[in-house]
Amino acid sequence: MEKTLSLRGLFRISRPINLLLIAFAQGMTAHFLIQTNAQGLPVLQDYRLYLLLMATVLVTAAGYMINDYYDVKIDYINRPNAVVVGKGIKRRVILVLHSLFNFMAIGLGWAVAPRIAAVIFFAGVLLWWYCNRLKRKPFIGNVAVAFLTGLSIYLVGYYYQKNELFVFTYALFAFFLNLIRELLKDLEDQHGDQLHGSKTLPIVLGFRKTKQVIYSIAITFVGAILTVSFQLNHTHLFYYFGGLGLVFCWFMWGIYRADRREQFTQLSAFAKAIMLVGTLSMAFL
């Protein structure tokens, strides 16, 4: 029997750890890269920052909900024990929560600034489009969700219009790492995706060629980070990224050796950890 709504189901479907990571990255960006608002006050004392964070968290949570709504049949194959739709929360309740969270996010964005509301609205539409169509197409869906991850960081610089180059650098960092992570998740979920007619990159190109795409993205990513590190001419930051680069090389070696589903699951989680550690480097700036 379906439950109308359970707190445990709501907790699982909204991915609270991921939401906290997004809010943490935005808070770090504000504190270390923006520092003060237009009136010269510390940005952490600006209530609009917290409205922006909440708007981002709500629209992201709505995206997770609608993603599970559309993916319920695939999830029954790939991760049956983690399915919430139809078990912990009724399908129609998820649709109501998705709409409610999006409207609340847009409203909070409008309270910050109309242009922030416009970005939140765009993000909500792109998330729905991704879950409904783009996710089942090769590569474009991966790029879309990676773009939204980078956008969540850049949004802080866009609102305060300070140090936008630094903020863009970290948005780029998040984009590349999340793009790699999304491709790893496609490798992880290949069996269920194929049974339900999805045309993800591993299904279209195959296992080995998808790995080659990941290697190409990784080379571009490392080149971009090295270029930025040299241009910033900051010794501590250079060493920090150098050490992170060694960890990243080990991560890529793990991808090269991986051929089982559980290995890709572990690598996907490790990519999230690298993103968190990379975000902490903001403190050096």
Image (tube, rainbow, N blue to C red):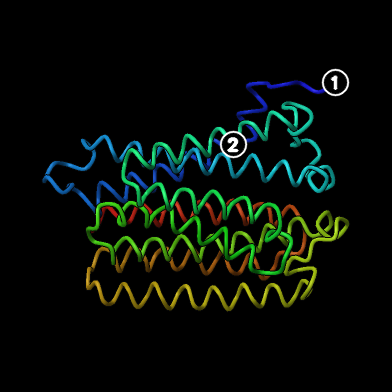
How far across and down, in percent of the image, does residue 270 sit? Answer: 56, 54
State the residue in front, 4 or 213: 4
What SS does tag 1 mark? loop
Amino acid under label 1? Met
**Residue depicted at x 25% and y 52%:** 160
Which callout, 2 or 1, points at the residue further toward the start of the chain?
A: 1
Q: Locate residue 186 relative to residue 234 in the image: left or right.
A: right
How far across and down, in percent of the image, does residue 231 sit? Answer: 26, 76
Q: Locate residue 42 relative to residue 159 in the image: left or right.
A: left
How far across and down, in percent of the image, does residue 244 sit? Answer: 42, 63
Question: Which residue has dot 2 on it?
Answer: 99
C-alpha gap between disc 2 and disc 1? 25 Å
State which quarter of the image contains the C terminus: bottom left
Rendered view: 178 above or below 211:
above
Mark 1: give few (<14), some (14-19) or many (20+) Cα within 10 Å. few
Asked if the residue under mark 1 is in contact with the one under mark 2, i.e. CB atoms within 8 Å, the reply is: no
**Residue depicted at x 17% and y 41%:** 42
Rendered image quadrant of residue 194: bottom right
Rendered image quadrant of residue 66: top right
In this view, the residue farthest toward the front is 114
Rendered view: 92 above or below 113:
above
**Residue depicted at x 34% and y 47%:** 114
State which quarter of the image contains the N terminus: top right
**Residue depicted at x 69% and y 59%:** 135
Rendered view: 31 above or below 134:
above
Amino acid under label 2? Ser
How far across and down, in percent of the image, does residue 127 sit? Answer: 59, 52
Kindly identify which numbered label has been placed on residue 230.
none
Q: Nearer the viewer, mark 2 or mark 1?
A: 2
Question: Which residue has dot 1 on it?
Answer: 1
What SS does tag 2 mark? helix
Mark 2: give few (<14), some (14-19) or many (20+) Cα within 10 Å. some
